[in-house]
Every structure is written in C-alpha cells, then in structure tokens.
Image (cartoon, helix red, strand yellow):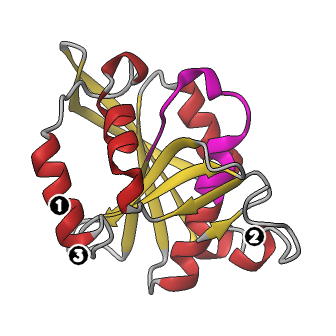
Amino acid sequence: MLVGRNVILRPLRSSDIQTYFDLGADIRMAGPYWPISIPCEKGFRSRFEQTGLWANDFSLLLITDHEERPLGYVGFFPGAPYQNTREIGYRLFDPRDQGRGIMTEAVTLTVGYLFASKRIERVQAAVIVGNEASRRVLEKVGFQKEGVLRSVVYVYGRTADMDLFSILRHEAATLEDILAPIDKPVHA
C-alpha cells in the first residue's frame, strides 16, 4: 500500500470488486477523453480471480482517500518488449473530484513506486490531445512531452491523436520523499 498525504493507493480487494466495476463501467463518469467501453463483468471478475489485477502484464492500484472512499485508479504495464519502461494510465471515477490534486499525488506515488521497485529508466503516459487536466497532472509530476501519436485512439466516434509524455528515473521524486510520514494513520 502506498500511503500519501491525501490519498492511498492499494491493490483491489475482493470487497472492492462490485463498487470498482460499477464506477468504472459507468460511461457517464468517463468524460470526453476516455474511450467508450462497456466491460464484461464476468470477464473482469475472472481476471481478478486469476491475478488480483496485479500481474507482470498489467497491475492496478485503487486510489482512495484516507476514509477509504474510492476515487479512481492507476494502472501500469510494460511498454514494447524492446523498451525499458512502464506505461501508466489513470482515471478518476467522478469528474467532480478534478482539481483537488488527487491524481497528481496518485501519479507521483505510482512513479516513485515504479522506480523503487522495477529496473526501469522511464515511465511514460499517453494523453488524448485536448485533455488539459491530464496533461497538467503529468507536467506537475515532472513528465515531459515527447511527441504526438497520430490517429492512435478511437474515442466518442472519432479517431484522436495522443501526446506522449515521459519521466526518467533521475527526474522523479523518490518514494521516500513522497510517502506520508509513518505516524500518519492509514484510515482516519
């Protein structure tokens, strides 16, 4: 579990599954920059039972506040086989939570964790062009824009470009510097 000053990141528990699935499947909450998809609950539950959504090909951390309210998630996965990287993706469940620093802290913690636990030199993220909130999150964490992935994603009936961002190990905050002090209780 990664305990930040305002958020906690942890793997999903069995008791989280229904809430997580319902929040993630509600396309009304996805916003205009998230590809529309209605997931299969049976398939989702099966993958959770097999891996706990914590595997080499894809890992997911639930973001909660210190009262355990689910706020969103951060996922990470390897880049192309020739890359020494992990790619991250993230989502807030409720757009009304935007602008509170939740995702900035969650991404900072995730990047710190990845560099502390994996033999990688970079973390990357792709953001649909025009998603200014997501771009600001990455820039606040220290990511730099590298270029544009043209016509790479289909979202809301159109093909969209994505900006590719990355942060290198030496550019990121260390995990020790970003975790909450040990005397901060996990749940208020």
Vertical position of residue 139 compared to residue 150: above or below: below
Question: To which quarter of the image does residue 163 belong?
Answer: top left
Q: Is residue 83 left or right of residue 72?
A: left
Please give the name of the residue rendered at 35% of the width and 35% of the height, measured from the top-left corner: 24
Residue at numbered disc 3: 82
Question: Between tags 1 and 3, which lies in front?
Answer: 1
Residue at numbered disc 2: 179
Q: Is residue 107 magenta?
A: yes
Q: Is residue 128 left or right of residue 52?
A: right
Q: Is residue 106 magenta?
A: yes
Q: Nearer the viewer, residue 27 or 160?
A: 27
Quote the CA–CA distance across marks 1 and 3. Answer: 26 Å
- Marks counted in the figure total 3
Q: Which quarter of the figure is the C terminus placed in?
A: bottom right
Q: Secondary structure at mark 1?
A: helix
Residue at numbered disc 1: 47
Please give the name of the residue rendered at 34% of the width and 28% of the height, measured from the top-left corner: 34
* Image coordinates for residue 65, horizontal then vertical, percent: 67, 48
Question: Between tags 1 and 2, which lies in front?
Answer: 1
Q: Amino acid at mark 2?
A: Leu
* Image coordinates for residue 72, horizontal then vertical, percent: 50, 42
Vertical position of residue 169 compared to residue 95: above or below: below
Proximity of marks 1 and 2: CB atoms separated by less than 8 Å: no
Q: Residues within 10 Å of mark 2 (few under 14, many from 20)?
A: some
Residue projecting furthest to the top: 157
Question: To which quarter of the image does residue 99 belong?
Answer: top right
- Identify the mark nearer the N-term, 1 or 3: 1
The residues colored magenta run 90-108
Q: Amino acid at mark 3?
A: Tyr
